[in-house]
Image (spheres, grey):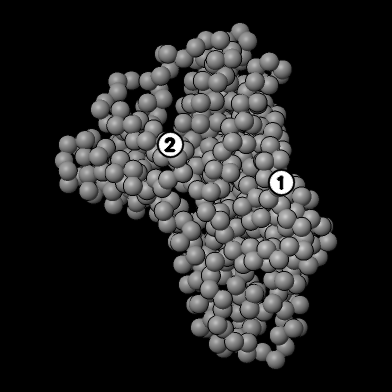
Amino acid sequence: MELTFAHWLYGFFTLAIIITMIFRKGVVLPTLLGTFVIAWVYKGNIVDGFTAIFNANLIAAQELFNIFLIITFMLALLNSLKDLGADVRMIQPIQKVMVNGHISFFVLVATTYVISLFFWPTPAVPLICALLVPAAVRAGLPPITAAVAIALAGQGMALSSDYIVQVAPGLSATSVGVDAGLVADKALIMSIIAGGVAIVLAYFMYRKSIRSKDDPKNITELKTLNAAESSDNKAKTSNLTRWSKIFAVFVPLSLLIVVIYMMYNKLFTSSGGLVGGDGAAFVGGVAVILLLLSTVAFGKHHALDYITNHITDGFVFAFKAMGPVIPIAGFFFLGSGDFAGSILGVEEGPSLLFGLVEATQEFLPQSALLSAFSLLIIGIITGLDGSGFSGLPLTGALAASLETTGMDAATLAAIGQMGAIWTGGGTIIAWSSLIAIAGFCGVSVMDLVRKNFIPVIVGLIVMTLAVVFIL
């Protein structure tokens, strides 16, 4: 396709944003400026440049608001449990398994992977962060390292294969013209290689930060799991200890029933199960009802005011943690054909990001090794829009055109799928669902990106080399 000046500008600002991230600086300024300049150039009207900034941020907020809501409701529930003192009681049994920070790291990895494989990470993250992360931090695992474990296992290893739900293999296979099961089988092996390398490397890179179980800093960092102010709510029940014990059992049991129901719905019914956004909505709704019950048990009729405080604190925390991500997402949504039209105020918007990738197709090499790495890099670039899934039709189409005697199209499509979802799914960009993990763990999403970057890139490179020379 023919590239316009707007395409080149988009490429320039994308490169500038990546370089800015490498130097560990904030990227909100270049994303806002890039959105304005590109819209101005594309429409030829400075007024349209101004309106595009607003539209891009509005659309990004709409697309990401489900993550804001799930963080808000889960944090509100955790704060209500803290009023009762049930939060401490709830994790006491789990602490018997998580005897130290090292074991806790791998318990988080295993649990996140299994749940995310069935339901996607979106509904899995709040469950794991509510039940397991506090116990892991008490055992000596720093919150940032816990966040790394969850991101690599869920957003990376589980979602990149999508072996159970098979949305990603389906998108890749459709463009290639092969069976989705074939792509899924190859993607599962690749995801285990990439994930195994990334997780082991991350553990060895950050193991020195893991503390002993008795380190007083564990209690200090436990407070960072949610940054809401300490509650001023006063107990209005004379049976606080009894209610604390009841909810310490009732809340984990309820969330366990949620997992069992979702798993049963997935495996033994024809409905396809509650996955992705539907699963997150189910978890969020259950959290709200638990919030109502626990607040009433604690405050009786004062719960009318207390629950408002909890919800407000949840929203404040969510926006503090994730507010800067909105303008970043807005810029990359501008590069996606799905959103560019709404941002620019035109009926059919340009696919600036994908247009740049498609323009390189004729220059891509034909050897198996170079074809594999070309698909990996293109997958990573398409994942920059924060979705991971939107680039799969493109990587699938390129895989079909780059098929060689040493590398079939299904394998190439699976490699492209790995690059797209490990990036946009996301583990190494801040404007993806990674912000939910950072929010629940009380850490900076940009710090989490930097912690994930080297393990993920090394894992993807090792995976690609293994596919070319071994598999």
**Label 1 secondary element:** helix
Identified by mark 1, the residue type is Arg
Question: In the rendered image, which quarter is residue 249 located in?
Answer: bottom right
Please provide percent x and percent y for residue 416.
Answer: 55, 27
Q: In screen coordinates, is 345 left or right of 155?
A: left
Which is more toward the observer, 107 or 239?
107
Residue that label 2 marks:
18
Identified by mark 2, the residue type is Ile
Q: In screen coordinates, is 54 left or right of 376?
A: left
Please provide percent x and percent y for residue 248.
Answer: 74, 72
Q: Are marks 1 and 2 in contact (CB under 8 Å)?
A: no
Please provide percent x and percent y for residue 162.
Answer: 63, 38
Q: Residue at 71% across / 85% down in the picture?
A: 240
**Label 2 secondary element:** helix
Select label 1 or label 2 by which is in front: 1
Crowd class of label 2 (few under 14; some 14 to 19; many from 20; radius 10 Å): some
Q: Residue at 48% across / 26% down in the picture?
A: 378
Disc assigned to residue 70: none
Could you tell me which quadrant the C terminus lies in? top right
Instruction: Say above or below: 250 vs 279.
Output: below
N-term-proximal mark, 1 vs 2: 2
Q: Measure the alpha-carbon separation of dots 1 and 2.
A: 28 Å
Residue that label 1 marks:
207
Which is more toward the observer, 460 or 398?
460
Q: Would you say residue 204 is visible in this rendering?
A: yes
Which is more toward the observer, 328 or 471?
328
Crowd class of label 1 (few under 14; some 14 to 19; many from 20; radius 10 Å): some
Q: Residue furthest top?
A: 405
Instruction: Say above or below: 212 vs 200.
Output: below
Q: Would you say residue 107 is visible in this rendering?
A: no
Could you tell me which quadrant the N terminus lies in? top left
